[in-house]
Amino acid sequence: MADTATCAPRSALDLYAPDALSNPWPHYRALRDQGAAVWLERVGAFFIGRYEDVHRALNDWQTFSSARGIGLNPVINAAWSEALICTDPPLHAERRRLITQALGPAAIKPVAETIDRRAEQLADALIARGRFDGVADMACDLPIHVVMELIGWPLDVRPSLLAIAENAWNGAGPAGPLTTSGLETMAAMMDLIAEIYDNNRLVPGGYAEQLAQAARRGDIPREAAIGLLAGYVVAAFETTIAAMASGAWLFACNPAEWDKLCANPALAAQAANEIVRMETPLQKFARYVTADATMSDGTMIPADSWAIVSYGSANRDERQFADPDAFVIDRRERQNLGFGHGPHNCAGQGLARMELSAVFGALARRGCRFELDGEPERIVNNIAYGFARLPLRVVRG
């Protein structure tokens, strides 16, 4: 690799320190202001945070490859070598079809009524309670009661999958305590999924069983099936939980935007986009740079480098979005990257959008609003962004 000092600005900023993980936005802005690509001395990788360059990297899979992994350590990249997120086309496209058959628009359309019905029940229950946790009581409801059933995870493992999914993302970080903990959790998750697959314990008729049947027919190897099943944990519920809780926090802190939604619940789909832009559930992934890459400002990233591609930073880039730190549910959308872009755009985004729109639309139609009822607690995670605890109270009238 060429001398990094001649290729890009340098920064000693630790993006993986707890304070930066809990509140990354000022750090992202500082790095964007330095340049289109900044060499992070602490992790030995380039940071790409401007919208134009992130968008380009996500589409240019030949140069910004996922095939060597999406983490900043070799352990997770080896462990997830068969995961969909760690493959490039054409293999990626072939295997992704197995996911989109279950989570694509045509597949999820029949479950819209079920999601809407559960969202209405949830809205009534939250209002009746008066006080609730925006994570445990609100955000987890549809993933537990609808999505896990659709996918077909065995009943006895559902609580375990929720508990381990978030921490597993820590394993994609650089060397450190959070990453060590995440790698241990990731190993436990993969072992659990392998046990479920090998013992044929998936619920008959669910999306996961359909995928397992493809492996047993010989369409894909066993290891690929396990990697794809792991993707269901993320694409179908973990990121949705984070976005749902973040949306509740944003509305609690921005009552004028909640009033807009109450006046016009049809804005729920736009609100879902804005929630994901503001509080991007998965902040950043690594990519291996296969050839010299020139960024929008002329900065060059040399071949055989690692780059951190930040969706979260791109979604707050003032070069792309007017007043990017403001939550505006009827914003004239300029495509945000909260669900990714290009070949690796989120396979479960249709389901996530449906859940977010259903829940916030149902709450808005009831005319109540909610406020913070205590100090929220952020998760501290190398990749994921959201809340561990979000105390809220209903305000009537």
Image: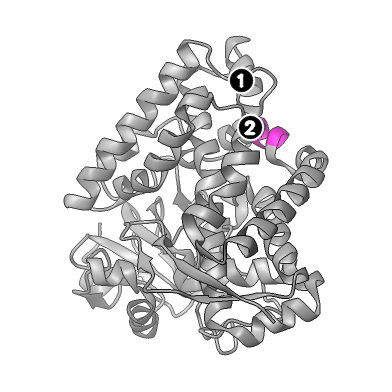
Q: Nearer the viewer, residue 205 or 293?
A: 205
Residue 236: in sight, yes or no? Answer: no
Is 50 displayed left or right of 117 in the figure? left
**Which image quarter holds the N terminus?**
bottom left
User: Which residue sits at x=23%, y=76%?
Assistant: 11
User: Which residue sits at x=46%, y=57%?
Assistant: 282
**Which image quarter holds the C terminus?**
bottom right
Give the secondary structure at mark 2: helix
Gap between marks 2 and 1 measured at Cα: 8 Å
Q: Are marks 2 and 1 in contact (CB under 8 Å)?
A: yes
User: Which residue sits at x=32%, y=57%?
Assistant: 381
* Between discs 2 and 1, the one toward the N terminus: 2
Residue 380 drawn at (x, y percent) = 31, 60
Which of the 4 quarters of the picture holds residue 328? bottom right
Residue 324 drawn at (x, y percent) = 54, 84
Tell me which amino acid carries mark 1.
Val
Residue range highlighted in magenta: 97-102
Q: Which residue is mark 2?
A: 149
Magenta region includes residue 98: yes
Tell me which amino acid carries mark 2.
Glu
User: What kind of secondary structure does the magenta stretch mostly adopt?
Assistant: helix
Residue 233 drawn at (x, y percent) = 50, 38
Figure disc tally? 2
